[in-house]
Amino acid sequence: MDERGGRREAWLRRGVAVLAVVAVVLIGAGVRLQAVDRLRIDYDEDDYLRAGQQYAAAIRAGDWAAFTELNYRTEHPPLSKMAYGVVLAALPPADLVPDRPTTAGPATLLPEPQLTAARLTSATFGILAVAAVAIVDPLGGLLLGIHTWTIKYSSQVMLEALPAFTSILTVLAYLGWKRGRSARAAGRRTRVSPTTWLALSAVFLGITASGKYLYVAAGVAVLLDMLWVRWSSTAGVGLDRWRRLGRTFAPSIAWGLLSIAAFLATDPYLWPDPIGRLQDSLFFFARYANEAPEVANAGYPLWQPLVWLAQNDLFDEGVFVVTLDVFITLLALVGIGRLWRRERTWVLWIVVALGFLLLWPVKWPQYVLALSAPLSLAAAQGLRAVLLEPAGRWIAHVRAGGIGRPRVDRRAVRDLGRAAPWLLPGLAVLAVLLLFPLLYQGAMALTDFTSTAIRDGLTGGVVREAARGLTGQVPAIDYQPFASQATSTRVHFAGFGLLWDIARGGIADLLVYTVIWTVLSVGLQALLGVSVALLLARRGIRFRGWWRTIYILPWAIPEFVGAIFWFNIVEPTNGWIALALGGTFDWGSSPEIALVVQLIAATWIGWPLVFLAATAALAMIPREVYDAASIDGAGAWRTFRTVTFPLLLPLVIPALIVRALLAFNQFYLFYALGSDYATMSTISFFLFGPNSRGPGGLFAVSAAINIFVVICLMVGLAWIVRRQRAGEVAYA
């Protein structure tokens, strides 16, 4: 291709990229304008509209000094409220929104057109945020544009939209600094100097802090990456490296000081008394988190932010064109590794923001906007890995003539014909034992099958109603499993409503807890089992055989019996712990404490299997590999990381898979311990739910959940087997 053709192709690519960004922005604008019109009045909108009215009145009167005294709801910085005031100043005055306590519900009526104008202001910043992400990755911008939580809280009179936008600019300017440094190091000139980019990043961070403190998480991620860059580019060993690193802190310090200056400059309320008013603002949050009745009454567990990320906005039905938040989060889990390799700052942003949300006691859903931008970029990478790139390779294969008449291996066909009489009976039994339960479970998920209709369901009612509904003979009923106690003795066709509710996150709290439970319980079992196996494999351990025998005993006890044993220990009033404390041990009142208690019991029950697998794997590792590592100068940690750990995996991974499968269905432990809804797994809740929030025996709901769980398990296990080749033990 000649030079002119190369330029034409480059211009064509740029044109396509620009069109993609424009299309994404138009989609993001369309759904936000629709949300501005359709969303009902929400909590806090009256507060921030009142604050905007106060600023608007000061602007009309030309009283600019009032900005140093005005800040309705002083716990939050005033920049977003000031932006509302600038817009409202152009409108005719309206009656000031009444001052209402923070514990009050949403206002029933707010003045128009002030409400619409303020919402449009918020939506404008939301659209700009979509545009900023789309410039980085149009697919990521599209996912951010249709993220329902982001649409909701960037289309209302809230504080989220402005800092969400400027936090993106903070990271983008910092990435411009990184690119500029790399270009300068390679001897290339840049249009904008790296120093300018770093200064812009600091200014945008200060503006972000003036919008809402939470969004400073992006700045923390930038600082961590900046230190990472400094550390990796600093030569030396040990203390000398730390000294050299200290001499390179000047840009980081200047960046931090400039961001503080930008914060003070854009927060006039702090000017009369910066330290005192900032302390009052920050200390308010500590008091609010521990004393506010609305926080205590909400009763959200530590992992509630994960629940918000695992469901769409279910409070505003009919507002959103598409609801794909659940899939965006799942795709982000797939793509986060790819995003790390592409640009780790975005991943650090996710980690910092999510870590804060998990630790902070207040768990309101609007807080997820602090990480929705980098989450969308990770989801874009996941979508490419799962769908777009495989589809592209398949299309390229088709265009290259890769699909034609398949070549038949006659020998393989002949061998298959000979083996068929021996294989068919086993395949038939497998189909009955495996496929029939799955198909029957799918039929159950299409009905309203509960314990009150168990006679009809088990005598053919499930199959009858599923077949009649799928063939159009009967319409689907409106099935609300938690609305009231089921009384019907007949099974009815309910359609795909239950499966759709799961897909959009209708029971995300149960599913998230089950995933957390599985990951933590299996992880602790792996940690304890491998650690004890490594400890007993050391030379000089006396009575090694006796210790191994003792450690296997918990596995020899039936797991349900072990669960009852732990119930005797943790029973709130008469258990061993309660007797030792001389009072009650009310561990079930806190979801976090309940999780810890259950994890201890599950770890005791399950770790011996991992211990056995790790012990067997260690016994099969040749001594020569350790001698080779020692000759190469590898220390203890490096030897474990590069020799022991990889050779443990082929036997440990299958044991972990078995424990993960059991953990997903470990209802006996929850049932024996007497857990309530907040601390029960999905299956145990729907089978043994009389003491929880809804009726027990919700078999159709359990079937719908199990379908989702089976799909997740199949995908996860296929990925693990493919990555680790668990079935191959090369050294055995």
Image: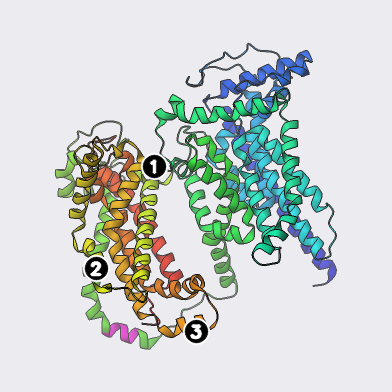
For label 3, the crowd category at 10 Å Cα-Cα, with few meaning under 14, some 14 to 19 and many 20 or more, is: few
Number of marks in the rendered image: 3
* Camera-side mark, 1 or 2: 1
Please check the rendered image and state whether residue 57 is part of the magenta-colored stretch, yes or no: no
Q: Amino acid at mark 2?
A: Leu
* Residue carrying label 2: 430
Point out the stretch of residues depicted in magenta: 413-418
Q: Residue 254 vs residue 688: left or right? A: right
In the image shown, does 678 or 466 lie closer to the viewer? 678
Instruction: Note whether 390 is above or below 84 in the view shown.
Output: below
Q: Position of residue 685 (x, y in %)?
A: 27, 43
Q: Can residue 182 be seen here? A: yes
**Residue most extreme to the bottom:** 411
Disc 3 target residue: 628
Say which quarter of the image contains residue 593.
top left
Residue 195's tag is none
Q: Nearer the viewer, mark 3 or mark 1?
A: 3
**Residue 336 x %, y %:** 55, 56
Colour scheme shown:
rainbow
Q: Which residue is mark 1?
A: 509
> Residue 701 in the image: x percent, y percent?
30, 44
The reply to whether dot 3 and dot 1 touch (C-beta < 8 Å) is no
Q: Is residue 535 left or right of residue 213?
A: left
At horizontal 33% and vertical 39% (from top left) the residue drawn is: 678
Amino acid found under the numbered disc labelled 1: Asp
C-alpha separation, residue under disc 3 versus residue under disc 1: 50 Å
In-image side of 724 versus 117 (left or right): left
Closer to us: 500 or 240 = 240
Circle 2: element type? helix
